[in-house]
Image: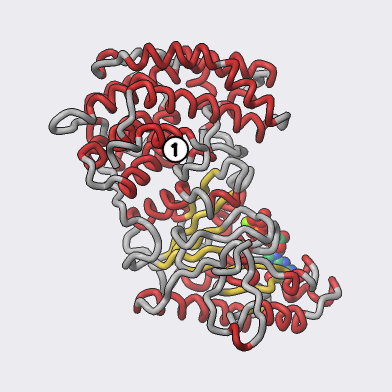
């Protein structure tokens, strides 16, 4: 899979049609709206994520990409560092569910790649927690031959589009306006891409959680009426 | 997924393997139940649990569109241990969750097969969807498509991938037929015509004979699955249409794409 797939891999990982379970996630938007956040503030919500959780995840994905080039590959420190920076248990679980889907894909398309084989043991770093999404993303990035920038951008793009796509389900509106929302976030996304791409070690992953998002996610896990996992 | 947040015993999570899909040598039969909203999918599953859980180790995955109501209904029916009934979220896309992106369902199925091993039969209820929703053969080994007489006698004749290609078509709530002016035998005959001989069963939970026939069918499919004689079929994007006897041998659901 290595070599010529980098650019295609970047598109693939950003494609909502990728069958890795993302369609059942809202990046906590469902819980935010449920808690009373007005729909007009969805652009602010996107910005807030880019400044906090999305930034941490993008940096972790790059740290995983770098770890994937080690010999032997050991994702344990990235997995542990990211788990420690994700204080909400439901959000760790949601990330692990997405990581599981990505890992299943990785095993299908690049089973022999050392980074993909290392996913088998990556979860052991934190007992009871499967491989988190950014770790699996980094492994796939390595298998596809993607750059740090491509990997970070895929992570951030997915975060924003998860919000915009869920918004269409939760507060139906003009689908074209959802595209506007993404493009409006472009300068900020690129800033975070540059910052995340400089992540050298798990130690460098910023610990930027968003207490309100954590709180909303916690409440969401206990509701019996929900469209999205988290 | 609050079920798996705080359980200390899940420290040794099994590693997923590449060979997780249906169609591999596996003891458990994964049986999907699809069909439009309210046609009696949950009730059919409750019936199967009531009738078969004494002889088989069973589990259920529900795909609820907006709530975990189906899972709660089944739990409250008391026909199966609560922890063997799990709901997955579908992000308002019940269709996607059983066909185009089966991740959440596969996770739930694999988790329960692992947790309650050995499991003989896992039933997966799709979120009530339209006539085009069918399961991917990567998720299930066989599927039941459920219609009911109250939806009208014409539905079976109109066809669709589930009606045409599911392993078993149920014409449910046959007890209601006189009240909704539907001729069950005609509806079954129409359905049989659309299905190239695959089975159609008129069912009512109040008709013990029909329930017994449903259970026999499940036992037969399970036996075929275990002996390796059963191959998962994809009903495909469109119902296979028959052009007469010379067409009888062609593969169902393939080759007639649009
Ligand atoms: N008369 C009659 N009613 C039935 C029968 N089976 C189910 N019902 C009723 O049909 C209604 C819908 O049944 P469910 O089993 O919830 O249907 P479902 O397909 O699971 O519904 P969704 O999950 O919402 O799509 C309920 O009121 C059931 O009591 C039957 O054999 N006869
Ligand atoms: Mg139901």
Crowdedness of circle 1 by 10 Å Cα count: few (<14), some, many (20+)?
some
Q: Is residue B220 visible?
A: yes
| SS at badge 1 | helix
Disc 1 residue lies near ligand 1 with CB under 8 A: no
In the rendered image, the residue lying farthest to the bottom is B245
**Dividing the image into four equal quarters, which quarter contains ligand 1?**
bottom right
Q: What residue appears at the point 58 percent right and 61 percent down from the top-left corner?
A: B134
Depth check: A80 or B156 in front? B156
| Percent coordinates x, y for residue B192 in the rendering | 67, 81
Would residue A22 be found to the left or right of residue B145 on screen?
left
**Position above or below: A144 against B215:** above
Residue B22 falls in image quadrant: bottom left
| Percent coordinates x, y for residue A137 in the rendering | 36, 32
Residue B112 falls in image quadrant: bottom left
Residue A125 falls in image quadrant: top left
Q: What residue appears at the point 37 percent right and 37 percent down from the top-left corner?
A: A99
Parent chain of label 1: A
Q: Is residue A131 visible?
A: no
Residue linked to disc 1: A12
Would residue B222 be found to the left or right of residue A225 on screen?
left
Q: Check the image and tell me how it is coloured.
A: secondary structure
| Percent coordinates x, y for residue B7 in the rendering | 35, 39
Depth check: A68 or A220 in front? A68
Q: What residue appears at the point 59 percent right and 71 percent down from the top-left corner?
A: B165
- Name the quarter where the N terminus of chain A is drawn: top left
Q: Tag count in the figure?
A: 1
In the rendered image, the residue lying farthest to the front is A4
């Amino acid at each position: 899979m290595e070599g010529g797939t980098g650019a295609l891999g970047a598109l693939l990982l950003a494609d909502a049609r990728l069958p890795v379970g993302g369609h059942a996630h809202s990046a906590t938007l469902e819980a935010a709206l449920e808690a009373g956040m007005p729909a007009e503030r969805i652009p602010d919500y996107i910005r807030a994520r880019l400044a906090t959780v999305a930034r941490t995840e993008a940096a972790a994905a790059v740290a995983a990409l770098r770890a994937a080039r080690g010999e032997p590959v050991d994702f344990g420190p990235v997995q542990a560092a990211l788990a420690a920076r994700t204080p909400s248990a439901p959000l760790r679980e949601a990330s692990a569910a997405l990581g599981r889907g990505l890992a299943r894909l990785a095993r299908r398309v690049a089973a022999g790649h050392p980074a993909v084989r290392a996913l088998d043991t990556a979860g052991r770093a934190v007992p009871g927690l499967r491989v988190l999404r950014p770790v699996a993303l980094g492994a796939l990035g390595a298998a596809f031959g993607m750059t740090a920038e491509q990997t970070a951008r895929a992570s951030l793009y997915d975060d924003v589009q998860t919000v915009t796509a869920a918004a269409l389900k939760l507060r139906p509106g003009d689908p074209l306006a959802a595209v506007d929302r993404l493009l409006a976030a472009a300068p900020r996304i690129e800033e975070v891409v540059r910052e995340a791409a400089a992540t050298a070690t798990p130690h460098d992953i910023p610990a930027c959680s968003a207490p309100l998002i954590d709180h909303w996610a916690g409440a969401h896990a206990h509701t019996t009426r929900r469209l999205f996992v988290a | 997924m609050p079920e798996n947040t705080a359980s200390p015993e899940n420290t040794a999570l099994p590693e997923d393997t590449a060979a997780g899909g249906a169609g591999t040598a596996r003891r458990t039969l994964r049986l999907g139940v699809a069909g439009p909203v309210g046609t009696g999918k949950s009730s059919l599953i409750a019936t199967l649990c009531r009738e078969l859980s004494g002889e088989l180790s069973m589990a259920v995955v529900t795909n609820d569109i907006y709530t975990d109501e189906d899972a709660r209904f089944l739990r409250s029916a008391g026909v199966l241990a609560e922890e063997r009934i799990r709901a997955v979220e579908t992000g308002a896309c019940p269709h996607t969750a059983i066909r185009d992106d089966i991740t959440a369902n596969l996770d739930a199925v694999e988790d329960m097969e692992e947790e309650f091993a050995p499991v003989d039969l896992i039933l997966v209820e799709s979120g009530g969807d339209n006539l085009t929703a069918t399961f991917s053969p990567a998720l299930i080994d066989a599927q039941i498509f459920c219609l009911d007489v109250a939806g009208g006698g014409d539905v079976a004749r109109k066809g669709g991938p589930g009606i045409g290609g599911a392993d078993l078509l149920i014409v449910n709530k046959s007890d209601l037929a006189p009240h909704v002016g539907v001729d069950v035998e005609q509806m079954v005959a129409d359905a049989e015509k659309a299905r190239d001989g695959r089975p159609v069963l008129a069912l009512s939970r109040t008709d013990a004979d029909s329930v017994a026939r449903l259970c026999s069918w499940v036992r037969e499919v399970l036996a075929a699955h275990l002996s390796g004689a059963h191959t998962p079929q994809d009903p495909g994007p469109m119902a296979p249409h028959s052009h007469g006897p010379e067409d009888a041998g062609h593969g169902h659901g393939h080759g007639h794409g649009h």
